[in-house]
Amino acid sequence: MKSILLIGLGSFGKYIAAQLSALDHQVMAVDQDEGRVNEILPLVTNAQIGDSTNAEFLKSLGVNNFDVCIVAIGNDFQSSLETTSLLKELGAKLVVARAERDVQAKFLLRNGADEVVDPEKQVAKWTAIRYSTDHILDYVELDENHSIFEVSVPEAWVGKTVGQIDVRKKYNVNIMAMKQNGKLNVSVTPDTVLTEDKTMLVLGEYKALRKCFRT
């Protein structure tokens, strides 16, 4: 369980709060809008109305006591930048800030953000990959070069074993797990038989995955 300070309760912030609550983390939520704060109260440990660009207000929250500080402000980049900078000045351990453009990400990283998330860009990439092919069911980007795909078994592989298709040697792609009827099996061996009712979780360089599955 982690203690998390969440600043900004627009749509993105509310989704984060809901997910953190489901994961049983302790969340302090902050926004200037009283309605947003009242709406989020059932999901979080505590919530306060306040201006996150005010150093005294942030200091009163004890930002250095939180494991993570998330700046989810979306429509006011100036406030997001000031809040991010103040959090770091006040001793925040880890500051994660939202960006809507690459230039915003650069400014945030230069002014206190340890990490930056761009939800629209990340979801756009996921959507493009997921729905531009027939057999990729899910996609997770690990870094700029590596990804995990959940893919259906290609028709040419059905009935063959993992050892027979040998994608590790041919494409430098690793089959991490198999999924069947919603259940995950991580005990994949060279003798595991691929069937059309299974999906595979495969890990590799993005370019290698695209080449392997012809996306």
Image (tube, grey):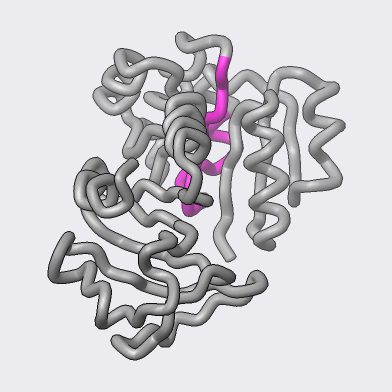
The verdict on residue 60 being magenta is: yes
Quadrant where the image shows the C terminus: top left
Magenta residues, start to end: 58-74
Total count of labels: 0
Residue at the image point whose x is 32% and y is 18% from the top: 102
> Considering depth in this image, is 186 or 102 the residue closer to the camera?
186
Residue at the image point whose x is 36% and y is 79% from the top: 160
Task: Report x, y in % for residue 7.
Answer: 59, 31
Residue at the image point whose x is 35% and y is 32% from the top: 113
Image quadrant in which you'd find residue 50: top right
Quadrant where the image shows the N terminus: bottom right
Task: Report x, y in % for residue 163.
Answer: 26, 82
Task: Report x, y in % for residue 75.
Answer: 57, 11
Task: Report x, y in % for residue 213.
Answer: 32, 51
Tell whether 63 sits left or right of 92: right
Task: Examine the rendering and report whether any part of residue 195 can be seen.
Answer: yes
The verdict on residue 115 being magenta is: no
Task: Examine the rendering and report whether any part of residue 97 can be seen.
Answer: no
Tell whether 151 sits left or right of 164: right
